Amino acid sequence: MAAVDLAAKIREVPDFPEPGIVFKDFMPLVGDAAALHQAVGELAAWSRTKEPTLILGAEARGFILGAAIACQVGCGFVAARRPGKLPPETVSATYALEYGQNSLELHPDAIPEGARVIVHDDLLATGGTVAAISDLVRRLGGEVVGAAFVIELDFLKGRDRLGGIDIHSLIHY
């Protein structure tokens, strides 16, 4: 099967979610069977080398590929959710976005002591989401062994904020 140009499957949406932001929409990529298969395969191949016990997908787009990556790697999947979505008890991480602030929550027992975790999201921008969720993983006793993305906005220098976390991105802008 011929390789798919994954970058060609990204739709740019100007002025979303607010003026001045050019949103990188990866939904056309996941809507294309060959592109989806290739993206999951490439992310899983990289992730497998880190020997994770869990893939942690950040809400909401990190859910879309995160569980598929975990399935191919042969490890578990954990969803980091927005506040109010997980019953009953949660722990929270708050972080700044390039255009606001947000929080993600996990169940306190979602990350077992010593778990090897790869954080997955669709896009790495400023690094705030991954920094906050990585701190939460560590507080719960896990080790972040990498972070995997479909898209990285290099000009925002998010990877610089993430210190020693090994980062893999399929598409760079």
Image (tube, grey):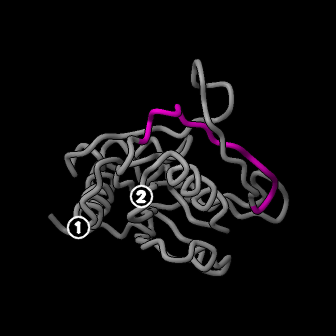
51 up-or-down from 5: above or below = above
Name the spot of residue 146 as percent of width and height, x first: 40, 65
**Residue 47 inside the magenta-drawn segment:** no
The quadrant where residue 155 appears? bottom right
Q: Of circles 2 and 1, which is in front?
A: 2
Q: Nearer the viewer, residue 165 or 97?
A: 165
Q: Amino acid at mark 1?
A: Thr
Q: Amino acid at mark 2?
A: Glu
Name the spot of residue 34 as percent of width and height, x first: 27, 54
Question: Residue, x 57% and y 49% (percent of image)?
Answer: 136
Q: Secondary structure under badge 2? A: strand
Q: On the picture, is 149 further left or further right than 114?
A: right
Q: What is the CA distance from the residue labelled 2 to the residue labelled 1?
A: 15 Å
Q: Nearer the viewer, residue 52 or 63?
A: 52
Upstream in sequence: badge 2 or badge 1: 1
Mark 1 surroundings within 10 Å by alpha-carbon count, few (fewer than 14), some (14 through 19), many (20 or more): few
Q: Secondary structure under badge 1? A: loop
Name the spot of residue 4 as percent of width and height, x first: 30, 66
Q: Looking at this view, name the residue that lies furthest to the left.
A: 1
Q: Please state the extent of the stretch shown in magenta in the rendering.
A: 98-111
Q: Nearer the viewer, residue 151 or 145?
A: 145
The quadrant the C terminus occupies is bottom right
Residue, disc 2:
143
Residue, disc 1:
49
Question: Residue, x 47% and y 38% (percent of image)?
Answer: 79
3 up-or-down from 134: above or below = below
Mark 2 surroundings within 10 Å by alpha-carbon count, few (fewer than 14), some (14 through 19), many (20 or more): many
Q: Looking at this view, name the residue that lies furthest to the top.
A: 88
The quadrant the N terminus occupies is bottom left
